[in-house]
Structure formats: structure tokens, C-alpha cells
Amino acid sequence: MDQEDREILPESVPAFHPSRKVQFFEVTVYLFLIVPSMILSLFAVRQVTVGFALTAFDTIFRDSAMVALILFLLWRNRERVSSIGWRFENSGREILAGVVLFPAVFYFTGLLGSILQEIGFSSPPVSQASFLTPDDPVQMGLAFFLVVVVAIAEETIFRGYLLLRFMNLGLGRVGAVIASSFVFSLGHGYEGSAGVITVGATGAVLAAVYIWRGNLIAPVVIHFLQNLTAILLLPLVSAQ
């Protein structure tokens, strides 16, 4: 990673910096743990209806476990969480940046998804919608908790950890953004091909915001508002 890349990333770790070989094996193991199940989602056909609660708990535990693994790797390498973008000195400003940027990101992803479906890319079957839609107040509370966990966990995994590691392995900014966004999109196969492409593009936008801000808070806020709108707010409005 060159000097210009270092300047746009969070502060370097003073105590220890793992070698490129160590980081290569670390990322290989991490990808081996998460990518196979994500790829399978591309071919998943839900013949049996899966309830929202089961899906939510599965996602919460899986994402939490992957963040726990990242924290362990950082601890082993004597790296600080600030090295992957968790910096809280200007958290109010970063939250505001996320709120201000959210409408543009939401409009962009909605427009892109619509265009892709119009030109023939697939959308998720209507029969699959139930496993992403809460049905009662208890499930709505669970949905809110899910949205919080997913926003924090996925930004930590795909923008903070993988983006930084890909850059350290020599992919450069653009290559790291593409690689991390591609891996991010793999877990959304249930959304159809239009959804996978849209999610990948969204990941690239969030990565650009992270690189620009040098902080994960703004991308987390955008991610949170995206999912909150899609999982809770729009279904509530549609039900009226």
C-alpha cells in the first residue's frame, strides 16, 4: 500500500504491522469461512417458507460471530479497532454526514435496481418476501435490532476489515473497492441478479464514503437507514 493510500485510511497501528504473507493467509482463511455460504445463496430456492424470526436470529448470530473473529485477529496482530475505521473523535459529524448522504444513496440504489429489472435482470420471487418482513410488534422490535447489528457488522467486515486488507495486499484503492464489494454482493443471491448487482454497487458507494471519511460511522449510518427503510418503514407504509 503506497503513501497516498495510507493518508486516506485511519491511523496506522504503532505497535505491530502484520507482514503481507500473514495478511494473505489471514484473509484467505476469513474468505474461506464466509464465501461458500454466500455463494450458495445465489442458487438458493426457498421451497419451504422460512419465518422472519429464524432468518433474523441466524443473521444476527452469524454476523456477530464474524465480527468477533475480526476482533480476535486485530487483537492477535496488536492492531487497534481505529485501524479499520472505528474512530469516535468526531462521531457527531460523521453521523450527520451519513444522514445527509443517505437520500442520494437510497435514490441511486432504487433507480439502479429498477433499471436492471426493466432490462431483464431477475428480481426476488414474491414468495420469498415473507422471510424479510416482520409480521407483528415483537418481530418489528427484532427487525430493528437486526438492522442495527447488520449495519455495524457488515460495514466492519466488508468496508473496514476486507477493504483494508485487500489494499494492504496490493490491490490498490479501486481494486480493493471492487473486491470487497463483490464479496459483499455474494450474500444477496436471494434478491435475484438485479439485487446482487445493486448490492455490489451500493457496497462500492459505501466503500467510497469510508475512504473519503476515513471512518466507518458514516457508512454504518447509511447502511442502517437503507435497511431500516426497506425492512421496516416501507412495509409499514404499504400496510396502511
Image (cartoon, rainbow, N blue to C red):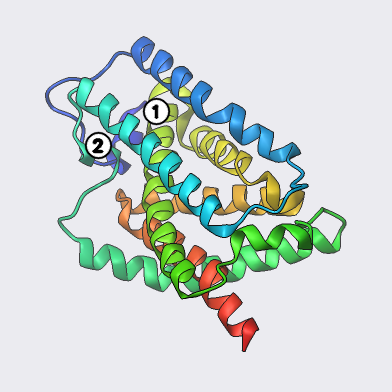
For the C terminus, the image quarter is bottom right
Relative to 105, is 25 above or below? above
Amino acid at circle 2: Ser
Q: In the current view of this chain or complex, which residue is farthest to the top?
A: 21
Q: Locate residue 80 relative to residue 3 in the image: left or right.
A: left
Which one is in front, 138 or 40?
138
Residue drawn at (73%, 40%) of the image? 44
Give the x, y percent position of residue 71.
27, 33
At horizontal 77% and vertical 60% (from top left) the residue drawn is 127
| Residue 13 position in % (x across, y down) | 18, 29
Q: Secondary structure at mark 1?
A: helix
Choose between 240 and 155: the one closer to the eye.
240
Residue at 59% over, 84% down:
237
Q: Position of residue 74 (x, y in %)?
A: 25, 28
Kindly report the distance in space between the C-alpha atoms of the residues bearing marks 1 and 2.
11 Å
Neighbour tally class for label 1: few under 14, some 14-19, many 20 plus, Cα within 10 Å: many
146, above or below 43, in the image: below
> Going from the N terminus, do you reach mark 1 or mark 2 first?
2
- In the picture of the structure, the residue carrying the numbered disc 2 is 83
Residue 136 position within the rendered picture, expressed as x and y whole percent measured from the top left: 52, 74
